[in-house]
Amino acid sequence: MNTASITELEPLLERARQARLRAYAPYSKFFVGAAVQTRDGRIFEGCNVENAAYGLCNCAERSALFAAVSAGCRPGDFVALAVIGECEGPISPCGACRQVIFELCEGDMPVLLGNLQQARQATTVATLLPGGFGPSDLGH
Ligand SMILES: O=c1ccn([C@H]2C[C@H](O)[C@@H](CO)O2)c(=O)[nH]1
Ligand SMILES: [Zn+2]
């Protein structure tokens, strides 16, 4: 993806940066924020929410997408996702989030990954999870 889309998605990444400030991450101390934009221009933010039972930790990406679905959004409603974390380079979504993104977002949907400095990687849903298992594999 080109520099134009990185520039276009920078405001969405800024929303992710704001969401990151609300992360509840007392165990990893690794704060992450995400923001997903809908076709009708709404933006849903999410942060990671950890738990003393570590396996229950929820990532920022899933928090943002689940907030959107909880507000009534459905597959086909999303146009872009941005994620930011305190990494050396652009953050890399975990496998669970890649699967959830694949379920809810179209393959060609742009995803902007960033860090707190200027590292940016513009990618797509299909690139994040090539060959992913999705709704069409269930035949309905
Ligand atoms: O893309 C990512 C990567 C990690 N985390 C969270 C999960 C956990 O709370 C912490 C450390 O893995 O960061 C996210 O929210 N998104
Ligand atoms: Zn994740």
Image (tube, helix red, strand yellow):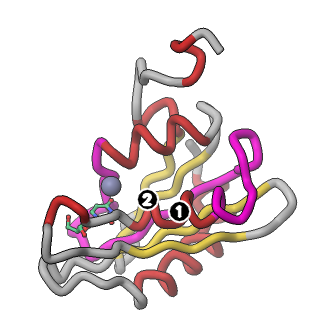
**In the rendered image, the vertical position of residue 36 relative to residue 100, given as above or below:** below
**In the rendered image, the vertical position of residue 19 relative to residue 33, given as above or below:** below
Percent position of residue 140, x then y: 65, 15
x 50%, y 72%: residue: 46
Helix, strand or loop for disc 1 = strand
Q: Is residue 37 left or right of residue 127?
A: right
Helix, strand or loop for disc 2 = strand
* Residue identifier under label 1: 82
Q: Are marks 1 and 2 in contact (CB under 8 Å)?
A: yes
| Image quadrant containing the N terminus | top right
Q: Nearer the viewer, residue 34 or 88?
A: 34
x 82%, y 65%: residue: 41
**In the rendered image, the vertical position of residue 12 relative to residue 103, given as above or below:** below
Percent position of residue 85, x then y: 33, 72
Three-letter code for the amino acid on which mark 1 is drawn? Ala
Three-letter code for the amino acid on which mark 2 is drawn? Leu
Q: Residue furthest bottom?
A: 21
The magenta segment is 68-95
Residue 140 lies in the magenta-colored region: no
Q: Residue furthest right?
A: 40
Mark 2 nearby-residue class (10 Å; few <14, some 14–19, many ≥20): many
Residue 93 lies in the magenta-colored region: yes
If you read the primary sequence from the N terminus, does the residue marked by circle 1 or circle 2 appear first? 1
x 35%, y 72%: residue: 48
Q: Is residue 107 left or right of residue 18?
A: right
**In the rendered image, the vertical position of residue 96 relative to residue 53, given as above or below:** above
Q: Residue furthest top?
A: 139
Q: Can you tell which quarter of the image residue 113 is in?
A: bottom left
User: Alpha carbon of mark 1 to alpha carbon of mark 2: how far?
Assistant: 6 Å
Percent position of residue 56, x then y: 24, 63
Q: Can you tell which quarter of the image residue 86 is in?
A: bottom left
Q: Which mark is residue 113?
A: 2
